[in-house]
Amino acid sequence: MKNLDELQQRLKEAYKSPITPLLEKPCNVKSRIDLVRQALDGKSLPSKIGAHLLIKTKALHEWHSLTRTVTIGADATNDIVLNSTFVSRIHCRLDCIEGNWQLHDPGSRNGTYVNNIRKTNVLLASGDLIMIGDITLIFVDNTTSERL
């Protein structure tokens, strides 16, 4: 039971981030942009035009350019590997369909949350906050008019 208690504590701590309280309010474009700026901690957005995904943990702040279908999960065969006990082997997939990015969760154990709502299929908008277990991801698409 000690391991379960430790996992629950880690998850509670992850959701106490400065971003979490703001997610409890409805997210419009302006509030999402403000959240992204806050999450960047003074670091800049990628200058390259296109869709990007920011992976943000206590130890990591990493941008990934999205140019094709991307799988995300704990297994080493994924395009983006997230090392967390809350992340399923194949947790979710991002697909670009006619210029729009869609997130698909094939049934991960702990779910995928977009702007604090559990989703299995959702079209992403620039500034969407994605929670996979205790890891925050931020989707940014600077090809749209919603530039950050």
Image: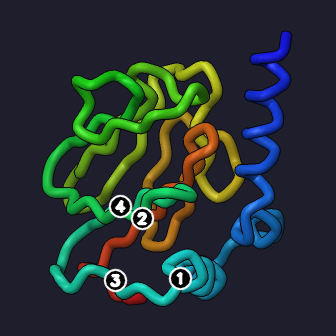
Say which mark, if any, is on residue 61: 2
Q: Secondary structure at mark 1?
A: loop
Contact between labelled residues 1 and 2, with CB atoms less than 8 Å apart: yes
Residue at the farthest top position: 1
Contact between labelled residues 4 and 2, with CB atoms less than 8 Å apart: no
Camera-side residue: 76 or 120? 76
Q: Secondary structure at mark 2?
A: strand
Residue drawn 64% across the image and 58% down it: 115
Q: Amino acid at mark 1?
A: Asp
Q: What percent of the width, then of the height, locates residue 119?
A: 59, 40
- Residue named by callout 4: 53
Residue drawn 56% across the image and 75% down it: 39
Alpha carbons under labels 2 and 1: distance apart: 10 Å
Q: Amino acid at mark 2?
A: His
Contact between labelled residues 1 and 3, with CB atoms less than 8 Å apart: no
Camera-side residue: 104 or 75? 75
Q: Residues within 10 Å of mark 3 (few under 14, many from 20)?
A: some
Among numbered discs 1 and 4, the one appearing first in the sequence: 1
Among numbered discs 3 and 2, the one appearing first in the sequence: 3
- Residue named by callout 1: 41
Q: Is residue 120 left or right of residue 77?
A: right
Q: Is residue 68 left or right of residue 72?
A: left
- Residue named by callout 3: 45
Q: Is residue 136 left or right of residue 123?
A: right
